[in-house]
Image (cartoon, rainbow, N blue to C red):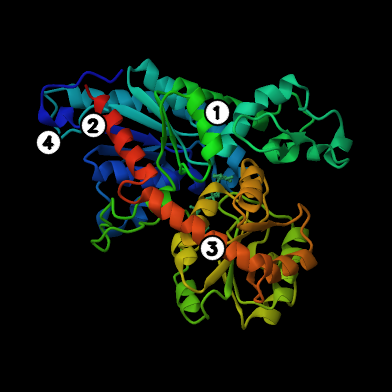
Amino acid sequence: MAAAPTSSAAARRPHALLVPFPCSGHINPTLHLARLLHSAGFVVTFVSTEHNHALMRARARGGGEGFRYEAIPGGLSPSARRAHDYGFGVLRAVRAHWPGHLRELIARLNSVADDSSSSSSSPPPPVTCVVASELMSFALDVAASLGVAAYVLWGTSACGLSCGLAVRELRRRAYVPLKDASYLTNGYLDTPIDWIAGMPTVRLGDVSSFVRTLDPTSFALRVEEDEANSCARAQGLILNTFDDLESDVLEALKDEFPRVYTIGPLAAAMHGRVVDRANGHGGAAAGLSLWEEDAACMTWLDAQPSGAVLYVSFGSLTVMSPDNIAELAWGLAESRRPFLWVVRPGLVAGGINALPDGFVSETKDRCFIAEWCAQEQVLRHRAVGAFLTHSGWNSSTESICSGVPMICWPGFADQYINSRYVCDEWGIGLRLDEELRREQVAAHVEELMGGGGGRGEEMRRSAAKWKAMAESATANGGSSYVSLDKLVEQLRLETE
Ligand code: UDX
């Protein structure tokens, strides 16, 4: 139940406190939701680590977007930020440090709001709802203990959520943990799983990367299971997908959870519903860049023919081995097509210096290497014809919103099931083997981007169809548009 409002008009204004897991893949959908709620008249407080808070303040365009920002210490040292298992390091740190900080933050905000003698000229109204991204389920418990309504923003796929919910049953049926290391390579991961509600038959190995474990107490698998099940403790489940994209899975989830709001793809839902403060018109405002965006890549794209460029990027967390980097590099070289490759700091030990000898000089006439870019803009550029991706959910939906087919190289978490849907359910992608081989990289690029009809042309047509469906879902009267209105209405009720 919501905290009791004070009598002032300001106190009756709904106040949403948004708590994303602090990596791009979770910050970006939360940021999109923050803009949507803010434009619907909510006071929005966006919670981030001190590290990300500093980046947000430094890079906020035109003095920010009208939200309130609050920082909580991330609890991660600079060396841990560069560690190989950075994502799990962040997760352990936020779980250990954030619950107490979050409780103090909400209590502080609400005591200022409720204190009529406060000297602050315009204190925010009390927090009326907390929206926590997946991986932040402790925020649901903190909110509940303070009597504040709590919602989950599941920023990744509905099929990924269903797989997370299936982990308990996988354990019960003794599929996981694996019996011994031979199960990793003996074909066991191809075992068909045909009983997950709303899902087609999928490979065991695609249910999650985390089934690849011999450890019955695996931290990653436990987190996946717990986070999916924690949705039952929320007053509502907000999904970054749209009804037509994952219809069967969504039907099954709606049977399980009473209040489900499918408001995605959030990257597209921005259109027409939010005034972009930077340029004054409705548009797709970007996510938070945790690294400096290389603006020169847009100029480079301007000079390329339409549909000719392969965009290559693996999101904010993937770490590649030097062998995989070399196979990918030589595969791109063999493809003989122009490409824009994001080699993020931390993607591979040594960064750009880890690219194989001779690769840059051989491809320099048709390649642009950036450390980070404005991905949503890049994918919408007319020159981009295909996306070689790790199949993170944001990358997948941003590609769908841009009508760009994909070459998928999933690495962990939901990325396997996302790529299974991209390739087999939506028909807009080709999948690479786990160990990259240059011949396969080059062959997939040729198949997807080459002329002469065939599967590539079919996938480009399907990608255009899914783009149109994403647009209709988020247009006035579309399923996601209507669902967002219902969510806003429900969140407003939490003030009463
Ligand atoms: C994480 C998990 O790894 C992923 O499996 C899950 O689906 C979401 O959370 P991440 O690996 O960062 O996310 O991938 P993704 O979901 O694709 O998000 C990356 C975000 O960074 C996208 O919004 C993308 O637009 C942005 N990005 C990426 C940039 O803005 N610039 C870049 O150069 C690369």
When asked about the image quadrant of residue 354, the answer is: bottom right
Which of marks 1 and 2 precedes in the sequence? 2
Q: Amino acid at mark 3?
A: Val
Residue 404 is labelled as 3
Residue highlighted by disc 2: 14
Q: Is residue 387 above or below residue 76?
A: below
Q: Amino acid at mark 2?
A: Pro
SS for dot 4: loop
Whole-number angstrom distance, CA of label 2 to CA of label 1: 27 Å
Residue count near mark 1 (Cα–Cα under 10 Å), binned few <14, some 14–19, many ≥20: many
Residue 121 is labelled as 4
SS for dot 3: loop
When asked about the image quadrant of residue 226, the answer is: top right
Residue at point 70% right, 28% down? 218
When asked about the image quadrant of residue 486, the answer is: top left
- The quadrant the C terminus occupies is top left
- The quadrant the N terminus occupies is top left
Residue highlighted by disc 1: 227
Whole-number angstrom distance, CA of label 1 to CA of label 4: 40 Å
